[in-house]
Amino acid sequence: MPRYIRSFVPGGTFFFTVTSENRSSTLLTDEIEMLRRAYKRVKNELPFETIAVCILPDHLHSIWTLPQDDGDYAKRWQQIKRSFSLGLPSASGRSPSKARQREKGIWQRRYWEHQIRDEIDLLRHTDYIHFNPVKHGLVKRVKDWPFSSLFRYVREGGLPEDWAEEPEKEGLFGE
């Protein structure tokens, strides 16, 4: 089995993609309140700052900044996944390996992490997170997806409410 090298940087800022085992599942949005409670509980126990987040039916994206003396995001994700999964039944058809490890088969074991390098990288990944529901065809406008930090950005004046919308097109002759 390959050994993945992760970048554990105290005080670092990271982009994550965390995915459910069943990619056709709607579990994360169906159980959004349970996921929010798990996220909040872990954030209170192991602090981090959420820069941006978007929950989709089968995966989520987020950007975190960790405390200056702590680079262990893996423990945080492990605890969020565990806390969320505790209240749910095991997935049907989970693999023997997951059963042996007492995993419920709700989450993929691995996740994607990327250390944010600079302000441009941060902006690019934040835009990606907020636009993701449109990319996946879940809504036509980013403001129509309720499970996103976009609304905090709009409320705080960081983005306009119509961010990423196409302007109304004029008629063929400029009418």
Image: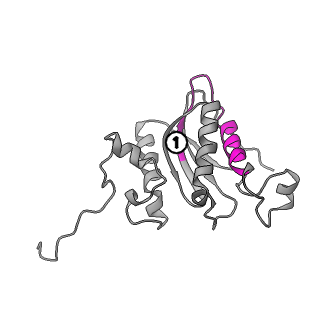
Residue 108 percent across, percent down from the top left = 70, 55
Disc 1 marks a residue whose amino acid type is Ile
159 and 124: which one is in front? Answer: 159
Rate crowding at label 1 as few (under 14), some (14 to 19) or many (20 or more) other CA atoms within 10 Å: many
Query: In the rendered image, is residue 46 in sight?
Result: no
Q: Is residue 93 visible?
A: yes
* Residue bearing mark 1: 63
Residue at 57% across, 61% down: 57
Q: Please provide percent x and percent y for residue 36.
A: 58, 46
Vertical relation: 3 (above or below) 91? above
What residue occupies the far bottom of the structure in this picture? 172
**Residue nearest the observer in this picture, 114 or 35:** 35
Q: Residue at x 85, y 50 (%)?
A: 101
Residue 83 highlighted magenta (yes or no):
yes
Q: Is residue 86 magenta?
A: no
Task: Give the residues in magenta.
Answer: 62-85
When the figure is inspected, residue 32 is found, relative to residue 41, above or below; the finding is below
Considering only vertical position in the picture, is 105 above or below 75?
A: below
Q: Secondary structure at mark 1?
A: strand
The residue at 70%/36% (across/down) is 75
- Residue 166: percent from left, percent from top: 29, 63
